[in-house]
Image (tube, rainbow, N blue to C red):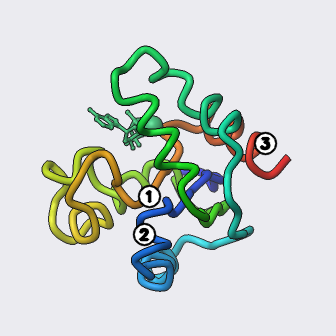
Amino acid sequence: MAIEKTFIMIKPDAVRDRKIGEIVARIERSGLVIERMEMTTLERATVEEHYAHLADKPFFGGLCDFMTSGPVVKMVVSGLSAVAKMRTLMGATNPLDAAPGTIRGDFAVDVNANVIHGSDCLENAEIEIKRFFG
Ligand code: DAT
Ligand code: MG
C-alpha cells in the first residue's frame, strides 16, 4: 500500500441538502486526510471534459445540467490507498446498488444525483486534481 492522493467532489445535490459536514466527517473518520477543499460552481466546459467518457450516453446532457446546477465542494484527499479507499466509502455508482453504510447508500436514492464523485484510478486522480485545482 502506498500513500496516494485522490480527487473528491461533493455534488450539488448534497450541498443543497446540507450534507457537506456529514460527508467530510466520514472521510476524516476513515483516517484519510483532506489536503485541499474549496466550494465552487463548475463551468459547463469543465464538466463536459470531466465526463467525456460518457459523452455518447443519453443522460450526458442531464448530467452536465445537474453538475452545474449549484456549488460543489472539491477536495484533494490523501492517505494509504486513498483512491480505492474512497471508492469503498462512496459505494456503487447507482445508489440502488450502494450498500448501507456507504455515502451513496446512505445519502442518495437516484443515479442522476448520487452525492459524490471520487477518482476511479490513480492515473485519473492525477488528471482530475490538475483539472480542478490547476
Ligand atoms: P462513478 O461516478 O461511480 O465513477 P461513472 O464514472 O460511470 O461512475 O459515471 C459518472 C456519473 O455519471 C455517475 O456518478 C452518475 C452518472 N451516471 C452514470 N451512469 C448513469 C446512468 N445510467 N444514468 C444516469 N446517470 C448516470
Ligand atoms: Mg467515474
Which dot marks residue 14?
Answer: 2
Q: Earlier in the sequence, mark 2 or mark 3?
A: 2
Q: Residues within 10 Å of mark 1 (few under 14, many from 20)?
A: many
Where residue 105 appears, as percent x and y from the top left, is: 21, 63
Where residue 37 appears, as percent x and y from the top left, is: 70, 70
Which dot marks residue 116?
Answer: 1
Q: Measure the alpha-carbon separation of dots 2 and 1.
A: 8 Å
Q: SS at mark 1?
A: strand
CB under 8 Å between discs 2 and 1? yes
For the point 53% across and 55% down, the residue is 69
Where residue 40 appears, as percent x and y from the top left, is: 70, 63
Name the residue beneath numbered marker 3. Answer: 130
Q: Measure the alpha-carbon separation of dots 3 and 1.
A: 19 Å
Q: Quadrant of residue 88?
A: bottom left
Q: SS at mark 3?
A: helix
Q: Amino acid at mark 1?
A: Ile
